[in-house]
Amino acid sequence: MRRPLCLLLFLPFLAACDPASLGATAAVGVGSVAVIGRTPMDAAVSLATGRDCSVVRLDRGLGYCRPVEPPPAPPPYCTRSLGRVDCWREPPLAFPMQRGVADGPEGLTAEQEAHRTRRWGLW
């Protein structure tokens, strides 16, 4: 399995040795930028590093690879008050604990966290 992947990575370099295939290599590069937003070499780097890397990002004035996305901030804790809703960054230290306005999840589930941190590519 490792040998075919290695050959695929070096195939663009071998194609550029023949002047007749230089046009085909350029067409594949332009077509891949139009379809997947990166060149074949960018796709190989993205596959190897697990990050989203592209020269299109460089053209837009961004870094070559997309930075790692931090986890989302926890939602505010909101309770009912007289005629309005009060929100805090942390739950107040009251006893008994007041019920929050939104009784949804307070963080990401394991499946959502796995989806957020998944690698780019085939695995």
Image: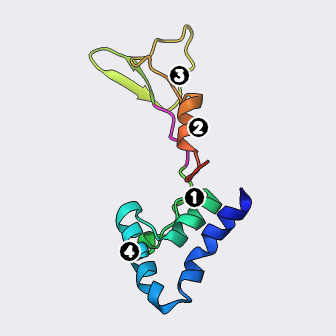
Q: Is residue 74 visible?
A: yes
Number of the label disc, if any, that sits on residue 106 = none
Identified at 42% across, 79% down, the residue is: 24
Amino acid type of the residue tagged 1 in the rendering:
Arg
Image point 41% across, 84% down: which residue? 23
Q: State the residue position of label 4.
A: 30
Q: Nearer the viewer, mark 2 or mark 4?
A: 4
Q: Nearer the viewer, mark 3 or mark 4?
A: 4
Give neighbour class at mark 1: few <14, some 14-19, many 20+ (Cα, 10 Å): some
**Left or right: where 1 falls relative to 42:** right
- Which tag, 3 or 4, sits closer to the chain's start? 4
Q: Looking at the image, is mark 4 or mark 1 earlier in the sequence?
A: 4
Mark closer to the observer (4, 1): 4
What distance separates the C-alpha of mark 1 from that of mark 3? 40 Å
Residues under numbered marks 2 and 4 in contact, where contact means CB atoms less than 8 Å apart: no
The image's mark for residue 114 is 2
- Under tag 4, what secondary structure? helix
The residue carrying mark 3 is 92
Query: Is 73 a magenta residue?
Result: yes
Return the residue found at the far bottom.
Answer: 19
Mark found first going from the N terminus, 2 or 4: 4
